Every structure is written in structure tokens, then in C-alpha cells.
Amino acid sequence: MNLEVDTFETLFKNALRMKAPRFFLRGFRRPSEVASLALGKLERQVLDQTWRRGEVSVRDIYVAFDEQMAYTTLMTTLDRLYKKKLLDRRKDGRAFLYAPAVSREEFEHGIRADVIDGLLGGGAEGIEPVLAYIVDTVSERDRESLDELDRLVKEKKRELRRKAEK
């Protein structure tokens, strides 16, 4: 096997072909880690409750946590989620009612976008090794997923051609 060693990209491509063991890149975060950095454990749990229930009061969340968490802690957590623009709130008498500002799907999409942006470094330069790795990983796990990936690529190409023709 002839390994070219002139660039990092070439090394990366060769590592992909050789099925190199996985390793962690310094500074790279998995989707679950991105979510953990954006939100603490309690924030994620409270946000999950709002996704399940819709509009909630602090009292609703307090009861959902079996009154095991301090009421003021939950009030502060809801306020932080509001300040992070993940919850909307409205006044109801002396209390606030909170509702999700983004759906679970929108939140998860944002996390995936952050991870991909981190992989690509914000640009398309050097994207080929990343795409090759994605294709290899998908094909190892599930042939149907590889077919779905192929369908998505073809669909996107058609969409781009239609836009270019306008």
C-alpha cells in the first residue's frame, strides 16, 4: 500500500481507507456534549417537560419533579431557559406561564448543525474526508440508510438545478 504523507488531508483519507480506530479530536464535541454545554442537566430535564406538556407554570414543573427540587431552583431554571430563547413566557396573574419557543426537532437540528459546523470548520474546504467518513460509517451500519443518503443527495441536486434554471 502506497501511503502519501504530504498533507493532513491525504493522511486523513488514508486513515479512512484503512479503517483506523476511532479517536477523539481535541475541541470536537459529540452532539450530546454540545447539548450538555448549551444546557445543564436540570435545564434539559425542564425543557423536556415543557416539550411534553406544552404551556407550564413553575408549580407544574415542581409537581412533575415530585416536589424533590426547590421551587426557586425550578423558577430560576425556567427563567434561564427563557433568557436563552428556548422558552416563551407570558404573565398569568402573579405568575408566569412558560411554553417551548422551539420544538424538540428544531433544537436537535441546531445541535446537529453545530456539530457539522465544528467538523467543517465553518467552510467547505477539506469536506471530502468528512463526507467519505460519513458514507463509510453509514454503509457499515445499514444499507437502507446508504440508499436514503443517495436519495437525499439526488433530491438536493435536482433542487439546486431547478433554482439555477430560474
Image (spheres, rainbow, N blue to C red):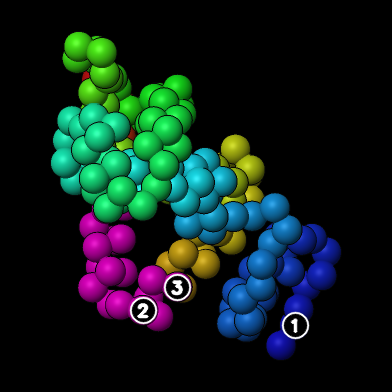
| Residue 68 visible here | yes
Q: Quadrant of residue 91?
A: top left
Q: Residues within 10 Å of mark 1 (few under 14, many from 20)?
A: few
Tell me the crowding category of disc 3: few under 14, some 14 to 19, or many 20 or more residues within 10 angstroms, Cα based. Answer: some
Which residue type does callout 1 highlight? Asn
Dot 1 corresponds to which residue? 2
Query: Which label's residue is closer to the chain start, 1 or 2?
Result: 1
Report if the CB atoms under discs 3 and 2 are less than 8 Å apart. Answer: yes
Does residue 13 belong to the magenta stretch?
A: no
The answer to whether 62 is drawn above or below residue 95 in the figure is: below
Residue 62 - label: none
SS category of the residue bearing label 3: helix
Amino acid carrying mark 3 in the image: Thr
Q: Which residues are magenta?
A: 137-153
Judge whether 164 appears above or below 24 on screen. above
Instruction: Give the CA distance from mark 3 to mark 2.
Output: 6 Å
Residue 86 drawn above or below residue 144: above
Q: Which residue does the image show at 44% across and 47% down from the upper left?
A: 42
Which residue matches tag 3? 137
Residue furthest out toward the bottom: 1
Q: Residue at x 29, y 61 (%)?
A: 150
